[in-house]
Amino acid sequence: MESLQHNLPRPWALSLAACAISIIAIARVFTPPAALRHLPKVPILPLLWSYFRGEVEDVRIKRLIVPFANERNEGVVLVYAFGRWIVHVLDHKIARDLSADIATWPKEVPPDDMLLWRFVGRTNVILANGKSWQRHSRVVKSALDRNVPIADFVGLGYKLFNVMGEGGRLLWDDLTMRFTLDAVGTTTFGHDFNAIADVNSPFVRKYNGVMDGIASPLYIIFPKLERWVPRPKVIAKIDEMVLLFTHLLEEKKQNAGNDMLTYMLEDPEMSDTEFRDNMVVFFIAGHDTTAGAMSSLVYYLARNPDMQVRAREEVLSAMGQKDPTLENMRQMPFTQACIREALRINTPITYMVPRSSPRPTLMSGSNGKTYALPANTSVILNICAIHYNDSYWPDPYQFNPERFFGKTEKDQTRVDASLWLPFALGPRQCPARNFAMYELRTLASMLLQRWEWTLPNDSPHSKAPQNGFSPFALSLPKNMDVVFKKRE
Ligand code: HEM
């Protein structure tokens, strides 16, 4: 008995062993796989700390990732996120090569656990690859190309101004979100969500509830938690929202209109699930992004009053007191450059959906370095990092619309198309870039025509726009009050 006790490990030895095993397990989780260890890597501790304190995406990228491009001249860097190591592309040439070759670089199948995909569905243009993507893309593009609904945007602009009343201090990011939501609703689904007029719009409340639920930081960092500690209330909300879209689809089948969904429904090959999943994609992809761009534009014109005056003079000279049209908006190159610069400096989508190649690949950067990647490596094109690369964009923190001008203001081709990436590039770039740019141009010209604006003295955004926390690579100004004054 005595010798048995003597042979048993002491409690302190057991604790030590448990500690050692835990450290090894944690180190294994946070160490990149051997085949990736030759790549530069963002140190894990500052990264985890950044996730745990909920640092917003663009700030984390500028602080921890951009220095790899600007100070170390690297074209890629490894970043730990969503429970794995991902290669972020920081070089514009690699970005262009990767985006052009969609056969080698299909989009990754997203992890099963993330609730976002329960909402978005899996049979849609944004997730499909190969032949299936071609089919979705054809339907989506032909619906988008049918018309540019400028008159609808103008009508919604007036609705917005009505709600803005006599002006004063207004929560601008909320108003832009309501505007773009109604823009997507009317032009895409032929359905008025009434988000601009009704501050308590039940649809907006439900949607925000779903997105807040999906976006819980802990579940984003450890998606497997959805399996271990499921969230039935969030799931119920998502399912209710998906059902709303199903009802909208049924309604549309009975009442065809002059909207994109009606055009899409003309395609006999699509199933109802595919239509519905594409509706959700249009809805999500189509409103937050444009709202963020509109908030950033107004913000930078508030911070740069001389540019606001210059853009207003241009707008008034092109359209006087009339409404914006396709023709008169062509006479506003400076305003267009301001929009492009706002989309660069606070790009709404900070990075793209991960891609991975089933084969080992070599990536050659414009920096002369070549990076070898094993098969099935997750790769993300980091738009924000490319927009802050100081060798492509001198003084990247400076709002400078003139960087887009060629020899004349009208010739905005000075910038290489592979450097300005808010809508991505290659065959899978945003199919709605024209739609979004006209939406932005219409509202911007109407605003400049009728309002002047400044930031309040106590604005938390006085030095830089403060974006909200978003797990879906979105960088959108949050809680941004702007003081509007009606023009005589
Ligand atoms: C300023 C506004 C917008 C920005 C910055 C933007 C940006 C982007 C980006 C970067 C992508 C590529 C994502 C990836 O491949 O990982 C994308 C794709 C997409 N966007 Fe947009 N977008 C905007 C507005 C819109 C609007 C208004 C709609 C619809 C009405 C829309 C629909 C889509 C769709 C369907 C795709 C998927 C295309 C595909 O995978 O083939 N976007 N967008």
Image (cartoon, rainbow, N blue to C red):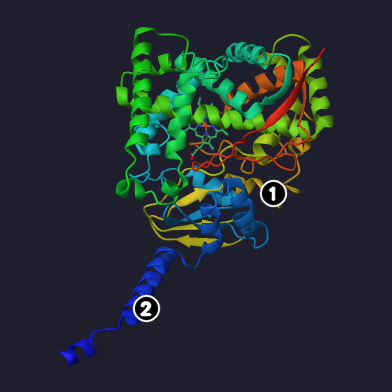
Q: Quadrant of the C terminus?
A: top right
* Closer-to-camera residue (434/278): 278
Question: Who's the residue at 33% across and 31% down the image?
Answer: 236
Q: Quadrant of residue 12?
A: bottom left
For the residues labelled 2 and 1, say whether their Cβ atoms are less than 8 Å apart.
no
Residue 135 falls left or right of residue 151: left
Q: Quadrant of residue 150?
A: top right
Question: Who's the residue at 44% across and 26% down the image?
Answer: 206
Q: Position of residue 2 (x, y in %)?
A: 18, 91
Q: Amino acid at mark 2?
A: Leu
> Of all residues shown, which one is farthest toward the front?
2
Q: Position of residue 442 (x, y in %)?
A: 66, 19
* Closer-to-camera residue (175/305): 175
User: Is residue 453 in view?
Assistant: yes
**Mark 2 vs mark 1, CA separation in Å:** 52 Å
User: Is residue 122 in view?
Assistant: no
User: Label 1: which residue?
Assistant: 392
| Front position among marks 2 and 1 | 2
> Of all residues shown, which one is farthest toward the bottom?
3
Question: Who's the residue at 44% across and 51% down the image?
Answer: 221
- The numbered disc on residue 295 is none
Q: Position of residue 179 (x, y in %)?
A: 58, 20
- The numbered disc on residue 16 is 2
Q: Quadrant of the N terminus?
A: bottom left
Q: Quadrant of residue 23?
A: bottom left
Q: Residues within 10 Å of mark 1 (few under 14, many from 20)?
A: some
Q: Could you tell which of marks 2 and 1 lies nearer the N-terminus?
A: 2
Q: Secondary structure at mark 2?
A: helix
Measured along the vertical axis of the image, is residue 41 above or below residue 456?
Answer: below
Q: Residues within 10 Å of mark 2 (few under 14, many from 20)?
A: few
Q: Amino acid at mark 1?
A: Tyr
Measured along the vertical axis of the image, is residue 206 above or below residue 230?
Answer: above
